[in-house]
Amino acid sequence: MRHFRHTVHMRPPAAAPVRARSWLSVVLVAVLAVAGIALIAPGDRAEAAALPSSILEGGYIISDAEFFDGDAMTAAQIQSFLNSKVGSCKSGYTCLKSFKGTMGKKAADSYCKAVAAKSSATAAQIIAAVGVACSINPKVILVMLQKEQGLVTSTAPSSWAYRAAMGQSCPDTAPCSAAAAGFINQVYLGARQMQVYTKNPTSFNYRAGQVNTIRWSPTASCGTSKVYIQNQATANLYIYTPYRPNVAALAAGYATGDSCSAYGNRNFYNYYEAWFAPSASASTGAPAQVPACQQPPAADIASSSGTATVTSATLNARKAPTMVCSSGMTSLKKGAQVTVTGKYGAWTKAKTAAGATVWLTTSYLKTSGTTGTPAGSSSPCTAPAKASITAATGTVQVTTSTLNVRTAPSTSCETGKIQLKQGETATRTGTYGVWWQISVSDKTYWGHSDYLAVVKTPTPTPTPTPTATSTPKPTTSATPKPTATPKPTATPKPTATPTATPKPTASPTPTPTATANPCAVPASGIKSASGTFVVRSGTVTARKAPSASCSTGTLKATTTTVMTRTGIYKDFTRLKIGSSTRWVKTTEITAATVRYTTAKVNFRAKATTSSTSYKMLAKGTRTVQIGTSGVWRKVIIGSQVGWVHSAYLSRTKPSTSSTAAKTMTTTATVNMRAGASTSTKVVVLLNKGAKVTVTGTSGVWRKVTTGTRTGWVHSAYLK
């Protein structure tokens, strides 16, 4: 399903943004007062683990914890960020930093909490309110606004840019929906849609924890790729923008790749990393950029054969399928012939007459005798390569009323499908992600593992003792072997050696195939992974091996069970649960957010200061966030669930030692007070840019000195 894209995804940005590393100096600039409690600015920039070091493999673009962190920025921080991206607007235009509109009341539903009405709401206030209501990181919303319409950095945004700000309900093949038009609608509905994907994961084409077929671009001839999507946030991005950037798009940085390049998810990663998680090692170029002569992953190259002839006057032969790869480049003249060995999007991999392996633009070749299909295949009924199917055994049974089994592992494959009824059985021959390959009436089909269960293999019936009436013909063998005919006796007795036990028939009985142990952990193929996770809903079974058939030594995990991810194998995730290692289906869990207390704070039974306090938490206490209610965070500490005010939670663990003196700068005009409270008198008004020395801390306040004066300043106003 593709509902919410806009064609701008297919274009690179008009200009590459400057990868400024000083944006954080202007983000933490505001103080909120809620119920008389000063709120600390949210934690510093995204943790390094929030984004992978590369998106070349395609299966992981951003972490769930980062993507769904709805209160990562306050309205004041967002405003400061917008101000930093645009100096001044062109005459007659309204830049995003200056936008205001009337935000109507939004009722709570299954996907977002209620949003209060507000007149003259700024873009920053709208983004912040929607982020909290729909639990979507405001940073994600800002990046979506940029990659869709360039709104964040535009100095002359058009009315259309606001009308289709998020690309929500703006498909490639039709006009945008009038009901979703306008900046406020776009932000709210675009963020809400991310929760629609998240809470209905089986209703869309791209799913976390399984192998997915993803196009390189809207052009069908460019082919597709197979991608194991590791988490829900990445699945959401692919549902919203259903194309994967190829190596040409990645090697181009922020610029144009080739005719099969798509840029939406590349640009999302580029902007997010550059703005919110700048890598210390990537000082130049775009965050997603790969080397100019980067080779595609082997699995993305389609096997192909035949002879190709150059049809242009000259054709550059490159070492990699990217236009920026010029190292070792040679030219072939018209009429030159090459031997085709593979295909990748708009490129043909071939060997020259001299034996060199090169990449050539397919549109300048005339190919004959080519066989093979594109990697991933654009046909939904093309079966995966045998090498990518994991052998499996056992008898499986249909667990739903009826089940469509198909000729390929895709719900889009309609050709040759048949329907099995509940209770019908088939023989399993392989697995491919969440799909099982089965044999029905000697024909191969694919069924979704959610609706199939492995039937326990029956214990072989013991060999019956032969009777006198069924005594076989005698042989000359004194000690009969399993395949030999035993000597007749009136009452044959079994020998002491099992291998010498006579068979009751003259025909040899084949030795039964050993049944695979469903609780055996795979020796290979487990990908390393990390992160903190909890159960998505209800109670799930955690198993000793990545198999739904493993029922020995299972554990039960609930929404309050904190688990540490250590690996991934197909559609299962390996987790550390207490001192035990267990496996859970990836679709049954979700990433949790780790936060640390920044000061001594009450751990309460309910989300209110009038609620009972379980205990006082020490500064630096680790919590796992599993819910939100306004300014309160529902957290797990050990095995106990309760509430902590967000003012006292941070991404990074604070130092529990005394604060060393350090120089900081004020980010705005701010009061320096006699005590760590807004109720204390003002010592002096500090101008923006004033330098102070921090000598102590108390919650969200910092004790500072400037000249001969000493006082307290809220940490949100210091960088």
Image (spheres, grey):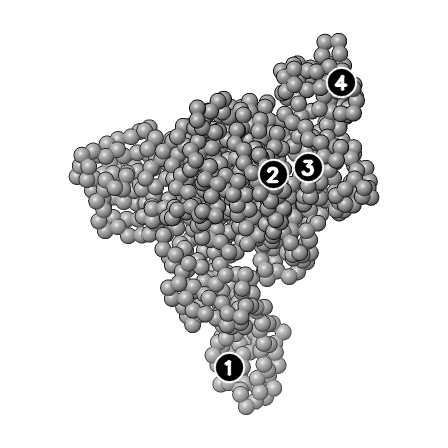
Q: Are marks 3 and 2 in contact (CB under 8 Å)?
A: no
Q: Which mark is residue 595?
A: 3
Seen at 39% across and 41% down, the residue is 7
Percent across and percent down for residue 564 are 65, 44
Q: Nearer the viewer, mark 4 or mark 1?
A: 4
Seen at 34% across and 43% down, the residue is 345
- How many dots with numbers? 4
Q: Nearer the viewer, mark 2 or mark 4?
A: 2
Which residue, given by chain and number where applicable, does mark 4 sit on? 682
Q: Nearer the viewer, mark 2 or mark 1?
A: 2
Q: Secondary structure at mark 4?
A: strand
Q: Nearer the viewer, mark 1 or mark 3?
A: 3
- Does label 3 or label 2 sit earlier along the sequence? 2
Seen at 65% across and 31% down, the residue is 43
Is residue 517 or residue 423 the one in the foreground? 423
Query: Which amino acid is tagged 1?
Result: Thr
Which residue, given by chain and number where applicable, does mark 1 sit on? 505
- Does label 3 or label 4 sit earlier along the sequence? 3
Graded by Cα atoms within 10 Å as few (under 14), some (14 to 19) or many (20 or more), the crowding at tag 2 reads some
Between marks 4 and 1, how big is the CA–CA gap?
103 Å
Query: Which amino acid is tagged 3?
Result: Arg
- Does label 2 or label 4 sit earlier along the sequence? 2
Between marks 1 and 3, how big is the CA–CA gap?
71 Å
Q: Secondary structure at mark 3?
A: strand
Which residue, given by chain and number where applicable, does mark 2 sit on? 118
Query: Which amino acid is tagged 2?
Result: Lys
Query: Which amino acid is tagged 4?
Result: Val
Between marks 3 and 2, how big is the CA–CA gap?
31 Å
- Does label 4 or label 1 sit earlier along the sequence? 1
Percent across and percent down for residue 353 are 22, 38
